[in-house]
Image (cartoon, helix red, strand yellow):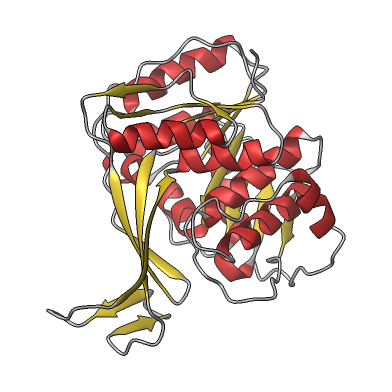
Amino acid sequence: MIFDIITIGDSVIDEFMEIDDATVNCEIDDKECKISFNYADKIPVKNFRKEVGGNAANISVNCATLGLKTAIYTEVGNDSDGNLILETLKQAGVDTSLSGQTEIPTDIHPVVVFKGERTIFSHHSKRDYRFPNFKSPRFIYYTSIGEGFEEIQNELEKWCEQNPNTILAMNPGSTQLHTNMKAVQNFLKNVDVLFVNKEEAQEIVGSKEKNVVELHKKLAEMGVGLSVITDSINGSSAYDSSKQVKIGIYDIDGTVKDKTGAGDAFASGFISAMFYGKEAEEALKWGAINSASGIAVVGATTGACTKEQMEEKLTKTLFTEPKL
């Protein structure tokens, strides 16, 4: 089978702990981006649940929900959590035939959710990824992998040179950015579409530059074809070395429940729009809508839009003015 998109990256189990908003033991400092707990306190947990997570898994589920023929290459443990990940992906319409299970245990990420904000305790085990054999898809989405990611990244670079018709999208993970930034920077010349938030863009270009257009230009100088930068409530923008397009957020009518997977929801909406032949400005709308739908519920992919839901929401002019 020829897939529309293949995602490559780690899959994990997210264990959500939703803290009761009424508790007086927790505080959010919006300016410092901190959630604080008193030392030695017992914090009441309103809800506890586990879900499949990880960027590659989230993207694959979201794209499948939007109608793309989707596959994932991921490595998980030969354990109950690994079985749960693969079975959940299959039920979501994601092909897992490229994926594998090893004796390295499946990674578990505890996620604290409080007043819609989330803090993730992330761990990516070193895994032995080997580039799989598959027919050239329309898109490859390469994302978060743990220590030792350089080997499969080198294989991916060679594959892309031999398959120039495939669009390579990338969203580097925290381990990749923090353990070998140079490898990420050197790889950008292969990337057709790069998804990062503003802080990640600053890290990659090595600058505290606050002007988003300048960040886009620096990424273009590093070889990126189309850069897409998100900046929380300020909106998002895309730049292809000739022009910038931008959009505000999709103003949902309701409380933000959980921001886990918001970036993945945005990227999958954007990629799916590209698949359906939409231009960058329209693709930003798809991303913003999918992200807004996701944060209205708890869970990284629970609120993912179908294509029909996306088209219906596009008829509503609920976008704020961008502040980028």
Query: Could you tell me which residue is drawn at 36 percent across and 77 percent down?
Result: 32
Could you tell me which quadrant the C terminus lies in? bottom right
Q: Who is closer to the viewer here, 99 or 56?
A: 99
Q: In this view, does 238 lie to the left or right of 186?
A: right
Give above or below for 99 relative to 37.
Answer: above
Q: Which residue lies furthest to the right in this view?
A: 315
Q: Who is closer to the viewer here, 197 or 37?
A: 37
Q: Where is residue 10 in the image (x, y as percent from the top left)?
A: 38, 35
Could you tell me which quadrant the N terminus lies in? top right
Residue 221 visible, this angle: no
Give above or below for 163 relative to 152.
Answer: above
Q: In this view, does 280 lie to the left or right of 155?
A: right
The quarter of the displayed image where residue 319 is located: bottom right
The quarter of the displayed image where residue 318 is located: bottom right
Q: In this view, does 190 lie to the left or right of 138?
A: left
Query: Could you tell me which residue is drawn at 70 percent across and 75 percent down?
Result: 253
Q: Who is closer to the viewer here, 171 or 185?
A: 171
The quarter of the displayed image where residue 185 is located: top left
Numbered circles on residues, count: 0
Give above or below for 130 relative to 145.
Answer: above
Q: Residue furthest bottom?
A: 24
Give above or below for 5 relative to 170.
Answer: above
Q: Who is closer to the viewer here, 156 or 226?
A: 156
Query: Could you tell me which residue is drawn at 31 percent across and 90 percent down?
Result: 24
Q: Where is residue 291 in the image (x, y as percent from the top left)?
A: 62, 57
Query: Could you tell me which residue is drawn at 69 percent across and 50 percent down?
Result: 305
Residue 298 visible, this angle: yes
Q: Position of residue 170 (x, y in %)?
A: 52, 36
Q: Position of residue 128 (x, y in %)?
A: 28, 22
